[in-house]
Image (cartoon, coloured by chain):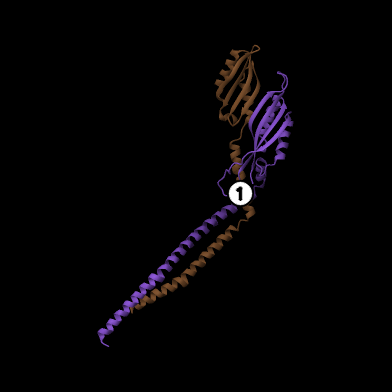
Amino acid sequence: MFSFLLFAATVVSYFGLSLGYKPFLNRQIAGKEAEVNQLAAAVPEAEQENFIRFYSQLANLEKVLNNHVVSSALFPFLERNTNVQIYYNILDFSASEKRLTLDGVAQNYDILAQQLEAFTQAKEVERFLINESQLSEGKIRFRVSLFLAPQVLR
Amino acid sequence: MKASTKRIFSLLGIAALLVATLAVYASLIRPEYEIVAQLRGVLSAKTKLLEEQGRVIAQVQDLIAQYQGAAQLQETISLALPTDEATASIFQQVNAIARANGQSTQAFGLTALAIKPASSDAPGSKGLGTLRLNFRLLGNYGGFKGFLKALETNVRVMDLAGLKMEQAGRPNQDLYFYNLVVDTYYQSH
């Protein structure tokens, strides 16, 4: 009797699984999928697109503003740090290299030395190179490259 | 039939039923149970996904509602970083700033640089396009300082990439040529 009951229970279990529980689970899964699809449609595509564009603009603008170059600081720096007996003929500036090359004229080498000392003291200048200097028509023509500290352009 | 023979048949019947039970279990129930276990796993994952999606959608709807209330902000941001090149307005803005500061535009050119990847990791995020302007101005020193100040505070973001300044008139004359390289930006499509 016991073995018959065991066999019957096994057969009933099989049919319960294959005809009852499995279709029930499949229906549940289909229902969840339908709900997920409904959720995705809850936000219209045009709104999603607009929102992503706006969000991208904010992220890109933050990046651009973090690297924004404040170039107008160059001239006050030069005015503060240029000897009155020196004038410049050419100014060449590269923001990516933070390099400012000046072609100038000094009254004599003493004045040029004072100018270079002023660049040495200036906190805006990380380092500088004197590319050339020569006596011409009684004055000193020179070219100097200044490498500026990053905060000068921020 | 003898009682012993009956018992033997009974034992054989029990053994046959046990064998049949094992056969049903091994060949039908076990494979079916494995399928059911998989389906339960799938259902659990779908339920979790649905809950997460529900939370995300609620947050997105909240954000979109806030964003729709910030239309003014979006307009301002689009002036600083347009969603297209808007090259005509660049020329107008630079020229207007130059004129307002007593500088005359001698030459103007524009090149599109490579688009930089999106700043955000969010899916669908747009890249950052750069337009490089090359132009030449003529004017006095004080006016040019005003031009640079106005350029760097212009509503459309512009960065000075390079500048070459040379004497344009006599040595003591306050008149210079300025060759400028300026970068401005837009959001790529």
Chain the render paints brown: A
Instruction: Specify the quadrant that holds the N terminus of chain B.
Output: bottom left
Q: Residue at x 70, y 26 (%)?
A: B177
Q: Which residue is mark 1?
A: A52
Q: Residue at x 65, y 32 (%)?
A: B181
Chain the render paints purple: B
Q: Secondary structure at mark 1?
A: helix
Is B40 placed left or right of A90 in the picture? left
Position in image of residue B186 (x %, y %) = 65, 41
Up-down relation of residue B189 to residue B149 (above or below): below
Could you tell me if residue A13 is visible in this image? yes
Is A122 placed left or right of B141 in the picture? left
Q: Chain of mark 1?
A: A
Could you tell me if residue A2 is visible in this image? no
- The residue furthest bottom is B1
Amino acid residing under circle 1: Ile
For the residue carrying disc 1, how many other residues have a C-alpha within 10 Å: few (<14), some (14-19), or many (20+)?
A: some
Position in image of residue A141 (x %, y %) = 63, 16
Position in image of residue A94 (x %, y %) = 61, 29
Up-down relation of residue A27 to residue A85 (above or below): below
**Quadrant assignment, res A65:** top right
